[in-house]
Structures are given as C-alpha cells and as structure tokens.
Image: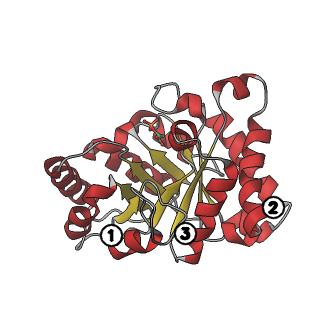
Amino acid sequence: MRQPVVMGNWKLNGSKEMVKDLIEGLKNELNGVEGVDVAIAPPVMYLAQAEALLADSNIILGAQNVDVNAQGAFTGDISPAMLKEFGASHIIIGHSERREYHNESDEFVAKKFGFLKESGLTPVFCIGESEAQNEAGETEAVCARQVDAVINALGVEALEGAIIAYEPIWAIGTGKAATAEDAQRIHATIRAHIAEKNADVAAKVVIQYGGSVKPENAASYFAQPDIDGALVGGASLDAASFAAIAKAAAEAKKA
Ligand code: PEP
C-alpha cells in the first residue's frame, strides 16, 4: 500500500510572520491526523525558521528547488547538502514554472533528480503537459518523455522512494482542475509506462496530482486508485484548506 503524500508548494510567498502563523495553524489542524505524509516547501529563506517551528511535529520540511552543483562559483544556487542541513528532505524539481521561466530541460531536471538521490533526499519530480499539448492529444507522450529522461539517465530504480507529481500545466493556479477521471487515466498510464521497465518500482512509486486542488475537489482525486496524494499551490497558503486536503487523503486511503 502506498502512503499518500500531500505537499504544499508555497512558491514565492512568505514573510517571517506568515511562516509562523501558517506552520502553527497547520500543527493545530493536523494534530492526530494519521495515514498521510504532509510536507511543506516554503521559500528557502525561511527553512531555518520552519525547521525550528516543525521540531515537535511530523510535518515534513521540503524545498522548491536545488542546484546541480555541490559547491563553488555558482552565484545564487543552493546545494542538496545545504537543504539537508536545514532539515529539508522533499525537494520539488521540474516544476513547470522552472521549466518555463528558467529554461530547465528534461535532462537538467534528471541531473537534479540524480543529485538529490545521491544526497539521500527525496525528489518530488513534476511532469505534465501544456494546454496545447493536451489539446493535441500528446499528454501521455509528454509525460513518458519527461519520465524517460530520468529513467534513461539514472535507471528505473532511481524512481524507488521518489515522488512523481503529475501536474497538467493548464490546471496550475487556474482553477481549471483536471477531472478526477482524466487524472486517474494519466496516472495509470504513467504507472504502466514505468511498469514496462520495472513492475515493482511502478507499484510502489507515489504519483501525486497537482493543479487547482482545493478542499472541495480533493476527495474526488484521492478516491482514484493511482492518485497518491497531491502537490498543492494556492490552497497550501491557508492552514485550514491545506489541512482539509491532507485529511481527505488520509480518509480516502484508509485501509
Ligand atoms: C503547483 O504550483 O504545483 C500547483 C499545483 O498550484 P495550484 O494548486 O495553485 O494549482
């Protein structure tokens, strides 16, 4: 059985006050909730503050990006060891915003994936198609190509213990979420694609859905057999909303 993972991607949002309020709110809301791994990815500036606030909590600390170099003359970059030192374990890579605004290629994302694994961190590996690709019927091929970049560079076993987040780009931050049935179909296709290389890895890998997940639609995704949680942007900035999504995952996946 796969334990669902619900992760909040705070993106470029935060202040010391917001970090404190949001984390304290989450600790209250999620007290006693079991059967779901809950993670948050604040901006890297706030990792130290978040680490301290989470010291007495099961909430997992994550981050939104990592570089491919360990140290040296790479202005503005952050290494896996730095993230690890501040207690961040689940690191988002390949988010469509980084692919688009920072020109990150499939190969570059695969390199980050390998570096995280080598460092003992968990990649939260985002894939997903654009609206044009969706309309052209290319969704499955795009997802397969993005997953293959990792498999070809690192071997299918690299996906063991990693998290894949299927995020149709047209659904991110738009309020235009994929239907649960459509998301399930794509998740099943992604899992089947991995199973062609290794059925055991495919059966175990957590595949989250991401794209306008809210408390109102969360349960419909988690009722699907191949949807193992969610990567949440907007709704993760509100403690009650994010906790409601996490609770829906715990409830739906109860044995
Ligand atoms: C995201 O940025 O990963 C995301 C899914 O955002 P939202 O939930 O706001 O659509």
**Which numbered disc, 2 or 1, marks the residue that appears first in the sequence?**
1
Give the structural element (helix, strand or loop) at label 2: helix
Q: CA distance from mark 1 to mark 3?
A: 22 Å
Residue placed under numbered mark 3 in the picture:
116
Residue placed under numbered mark 1 in the picture:
58
Residue at figure coordinates x 67%, y 42% from the top left: 184
Residue placed under numbered mark 2 in the picture:
195
Q: Horizontal and vertical percent for residue 33?
A: 34, 62
Q: CA distance from mark 2 to mark 1?
A: 32 Å
Amino acid on which the number 2 mark rests in the picture:
Ala
Specify the quadrant of the image occupied by residue 143: top right
Residue at figure coordinates x 81%, y 68% from the top left: 198
Quadrant for the C terminus in the image: bottom right
Q: How is the image coloured?
A: secondary structure
Quadrant for the N terminus in the image: bottom right
Q: Horizontal and vertical percent for residue 72?
A: 45, 70
Amino acid on which the number 3 mark rests in the picture:
Leu
**Which numbered disc, 1 or 3, marks the residue that appears first in the sequence?**
1
Residue 159 makes an appearance in the image: yes
Task: Report if the beta carbon of the residue with label 1 is closer than 8 angstroms to ligand 1.
Answer: no
Q: Which mark is residue 50?
A: none
Q: Is residue 63 above or below residue 99?
A: below
**Which numbered disc, 3 or 2, marks the residue that appears first in the sequence?**
3
